[in-house]
Image: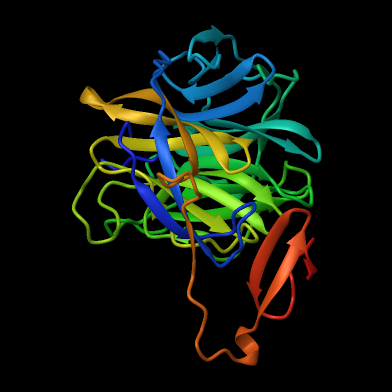
Amino acid sequence: MIRRMVSVVCVAGLLAVVAGQPSSAVVEWELIDESVSLGMNGVSPHVEKVAQGDRVWRSDTSPSGTAVSLCNDAGSCSTESLTFAEAGGASDFAISQTASGRRAYFKRLEPSANTQTVYSAPCLTADCLSVGATTLTSSDMRVSKDQKAWGVPDPVRLPDGRTRIYIVESPEMTTSCPEKVASYISTDGITFTKESGWRLEGGYVDTEVLRAKDGEWLMIMADGPGCPAGGSRKLQQLYVSTSTDGLSWSKPQVLTNASQGRLDPTGYEVSTNVFRIYYALGEANNTYTLKRATLRIKETPAGSIGVTNTPKATTPSSKSKTITCVKGKTVKKVTGTKCPKGFTKK
């Protein structure tokens, strides 16, 4: 969780790469809260869909720093046991399939060394309720334990089998929105190297990649209090962004309003362009409860998809030529002369 110290539904128009929609379309998304009471407190949730329902890890006050529950569709959740091979506690727990097997990624505070560090460890069981010995991800993912607005690693398996970690960093704390999203890459999911540049700037935090396919990436995230830059301190909101390669992301578009503080989203795709989302809701006395919602493309009252095409250029040039690219049932309009990887020119 990043902090600096609906059903309310807000719609975002997003120039996006979305399954089944041309890349020139403006897609309207909506987030609708579900009327379930999960009975879970905490922040930084991570969810996995399993045969029995949704398994949800989150940071709370348990001895290990991370608790886990199994929830059914009705929103009834039962506590499960999570064990670590090593002492030390863990927060911001997440899991990814890597070239070396399923691994857990998490942050640990090391008071004796005055540091906080992102480690990974192998899942010793298929459900990752038992975690093995830890390995340092990268010396660059170790900073002072007093550094604010840092962490919440989001490991993602790339289409080519590599693993990427998105993480919030704050190279300077002199602005109202110091957070930037960096990324680290690994071939084995164990040893990571920082990638150049920033994936997002301007105070966005708590990233969660919901889709990572060739040419089709979707991310949900929150913003930090006081963002965008220059704004007054406010409650955090949720946003969405898209990408064709996982490196360059579109400007995030807001999903919620500031009537309540929402942060730390996680989720998975239920069906094409429909996602189940869990997030932390800030409440009185600096407490947080987990909520569940559905993210999907907005439907108009007539039942059609809320998508509009962007106007075509009135004076096209050879450099702005638009071509049609096809991959299975997915059709994209692409500006240029080449189709994305995996697509063929129609």
Side (left or right) of 284 relative to 339: left
Task: Measuring from the top left, give residue 160's x and y in whole percent.
Answer: 79, 52
Side (left or right) of 21 relative to 324: left
Task: Measuring from the top left, give residue 266's x and y in whole percent.
Answer: 51, 35
Task: Measuring from the top left, give residue 293's x and y in whole percent.
Answer: 44, 30
Q: Would you identify the image quadrant in which residue 216 lies?
A: bottom right
- Would residue 206 be visible to someone looking at this image? no
Task: Measuring from the top left, give residue 63's x and y in whole percent.
Answer: 48, 13
Q: Would you identify the image quadrant in which residue 172 lies?
A: bottom left
For the residue pair 161 and 86, the one nearer the viewer reads as 161
Q: How many marks?
A: 0
- Would residue 37 be visible to someone looking at this image? yes
Q: Is residue 282 above or below residue 24?
A: above
For the residue pair 159 and 101, the one nearer the viewer reads as 159
Colouring chosen for the image of the structure: rainbow
Q: Is residue 205 above or below residue 124?
A: below
Q: Is residue 280 above or below residue 193?
A: above
Q: Residue furthest front?
A: 302
Q: Would you identify the image quadrant in which residue 31 lies?
A: top left
Picture quarter with the N terminus:
top left
